Structures are given as structure tokens and as C-alpha cells.
């Protein structure tokens, strides 16, 4: 352990310099942190090719700027579907070609970064890996932007500390994602820490995205949390959408139907406008 551990800011690279502008992170032409608010949308996981291609088309038609492409799903039980892994890669590439959208996909293993790098435009670090220093450092050596979810048991400071591992290893393109924390409340799956949005935006120059889907765990609350996210200053949203949510293998209860997603984007456009921003 070195002496600087004991003093000062543990995340000098992530910290906002006084009065400095926020950093804009470009994900294959989609800017996070500027005037525009992009939507990252799609199913929780790639379950099969036909479903995924339909989900991709719906997400694009309803206004997504980045498409979710879950190949690896870290689950709370090893007996449940873990994602198709690299077997889903063909479907991912086909959806990317059909829609022209950049892909956001979770990476759980540093050994897979090289293999995924050409296909994936935004590497997601999930809440369960949010403080894995080996993974964070490996992503820091990659050329692809990183969407860093907040660990569900992490303070804002710990979240920024996690971002620092990526930045310090050489990758400046980090987007933070508030996705709910664990509290005593069980009415929702997690508790969306809406105050973390203005707090993080004060403390860091990095863009902050809100994920209402994993916080709520129930599609009934996703719209309200999404609207609140933009009103609180979020630089983007991550929303799960499935062509047929009741058939979804993972996170079925929280996925919006394409019609619900389309209706929500109309509302979000108006909230963004009230914030002098533009839904992309
Ligand atoms: C996801 O985005 O599908 C996911 C598993 O997210 P989290 O890590 O926030 O639970
Ligand atoms: Mn999910």
C-alpha cells in the first residue's frame, strides 16, 4: 500500500474540477453527456435469434439509440439461464447490421474482452462486478467505452472509485449508471437512488445514466423512474424492452412492451424539453 492511500481524493481522474464542463463520451457516434439524452434499450438477454431480431427492430423503431445485447448474464443462481455466451454472437451481429445501432453488452470475464471488442460498442459492467478490480483494469486497457453500473451496495464514493480503476488504466470513456441500491424497502426490486444523479454529477465530470428497469423490477414503476431520472439530470436511460415480455426468460416482470416503450418515449421527450435537453 502506498502512502497516498491515506490522503485526499481517491478518485482524482473521475473528480470534477471546479467549474469544468462535463465529459462527453461518444459511443459509435452517440454522445452521452451533451445536450442530447440517448436511450439504451432492448431485452435483458439474447434468448434466441428470432426474438432478438424482433426486439432489436422494435427498440430502434421506438427510439433507442443504443441496443442492449446481453450475451453473458450474471445470475443469482447457477441453475438459471446464464446467457447464450458467444453462441449468441451471430444474432448480435445480425441485429447490429439490421438496425445500424451500436451495441451495449455486459462483459464478466477479462479474457473475453478482445473477442467482444469488435462487435460491442459499449461494455457494461454489471452491479455484481462493479468493484472487480481485475475486470475494471482490463477494461481500462480496452479501446471501447464502458458503462459502469453502480454496485447495489456501493456508496457514490465507492462507485467513483470503481470508475477510477478504468480511467487510471488508460480508458477515458466511462459512463456511470445508477441502477438502484439495496435498502430495507422491498416494494421495488432495488431502490433507485435518484439523489445519486445530482450528487454524482456534482462530484464527477463523467456522464450519468439511469436504469429504471433493474431498480423497479416491475414494469409498472419503470415509466415514473425514467421520467424522474431525466428530471434529476440524467445523461441517458437504460430501459429493458421485450417484444413479448411474458415470454422473457430473464427479468420478465420489468420489461416494457414495445407499445409501452413508445408511449414512454413521448413523455420523456417532454420531460427532456422541460430540462432544456433533447431526447435523442
Ligand atoms: C442487466 O443490465 O441486465 C443487469 C443484469 O443489470 P444489473 O447488473 O444492474 O443487475
Ligand atoms: Mn436485466
Image (tube, grey):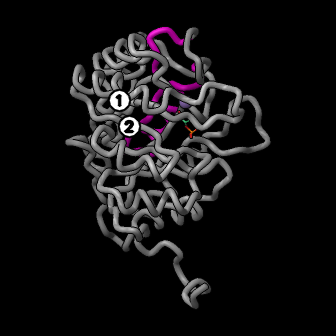
| 213, above or below 154, in the image | above
Residue topped by disc 1: 67
Where does label 2 land, which residue? Answer: 104
Looking at the rendering, the stretch of residues picked out in magenta corresponds to 219-245
**Residue depicted at 42% across the width and 12% down the height:** 51
Left or right of 247: which side holds 182?
right
> From what the image shows, is residue 180 above or below residue 84?
below
In the rendered image, the residue lying farthest to the bottom is: 3
Q: Work out which quarter of the rendered image holds the N terminus and state it.
A: bottom right
Instruction: Name the residue located 24 percent from the left edge and 41 percent from the top edge.
Output: 30
Q: Can residue 220 be seen by looking at this rendering?
A: no
Q: Position of residue 217 (x, y in %)?
A: 63, 27
Labels 2 & 1 near each other (Cβ < 8 A): yes
Residue 125 vertical placement versus 135 (above, below)? above
Residue 234 at x, y percent in the picture = 42, 44
Quadrant (top left/top right/bottom left/bottom right) for the C terminus: top left
Give ligand 2's quarter of the image: top right
Q: Earlier in the sequence, mark 2 or mark 1?
A: 1
Amino acid at each position: 500500500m502506498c502512502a497516498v492511500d491515506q490522503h485526499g481524493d481517491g478518485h482524482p481522474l473521475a473528480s470534477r474540477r471546479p467549474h469544468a464542463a462535463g465529459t462527453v463520451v461518444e459511443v459509435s457516434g452517440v454522445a452521452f453527456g451533451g445536450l442530447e439524452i440517448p436511450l439504451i434499450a432492448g431485452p435483458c438477454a439474447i434468448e434466441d435469434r428470432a426474438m432478438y431480431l424482433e426486439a432489436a427492430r422494435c427498440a430502434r423503431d421506438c427510439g433507442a439509440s443504443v441496443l442492449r445485447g446481453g450475451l453473458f448474464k450474471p445470475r443469482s443462481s447457477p441453475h438459471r439461464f446464464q446467457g447464450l455466451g458467444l453462441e449468441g454472437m451471430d444474432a448480435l451481429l445480425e441485429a447490429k447490421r439490421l438496425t445500424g445501432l451500436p451495441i451495449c453488452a455486459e462483459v464478466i470475464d477479462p479474457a473475453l474482452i478482445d473477442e467482444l471488442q469488435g462487435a460491442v460498442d459499449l461494455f457494461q459492467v454489471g452491479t455484481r462486478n462493479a468493484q472487480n478490480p481485475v475486470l475494471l483494469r482490463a477494461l481500462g486497457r480496452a479501446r471501447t467505452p464502458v458503462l459502469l453500473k453502480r454496485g447495489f451496495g456501493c456508496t457514490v464514493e465507492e462507485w467513483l472509485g470503481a470508475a477510477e480503476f478504468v480511467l487510471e488504466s488508460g480508458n477515458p470513456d466511462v459512463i456511470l449508471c445508477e441502477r438502484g441500491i439495496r435498502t430495507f424497502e422491498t416494494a421495488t426490486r432495488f431502490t433507485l437512488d435518484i439523489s445519486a444523479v445530482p450528487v454524482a454529477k456534482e462530484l464527477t465530470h463523467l456522464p450519468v445514466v439511469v436504469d429504471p428497469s433493474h431498480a423497479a423490477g416491475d414494469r409498472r414503476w419503470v415509466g415514473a423512474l425514467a421520467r424522474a431520472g431525466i428530471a434529476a439530470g440524467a445523461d441517458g436511460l437504460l430501459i429493458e424492452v421485450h417484444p413479448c415480455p411474458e415470454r422473457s426468460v430473464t427479468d420478465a416482470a420489468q420489461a416494457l412492451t414495445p407499445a409501452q416503450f413508445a408511449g414512454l418515449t413521448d413523455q420523456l421527450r417532454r420531460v427532456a424539453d422541460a430540462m432544456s435537453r433533447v431526447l435523442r
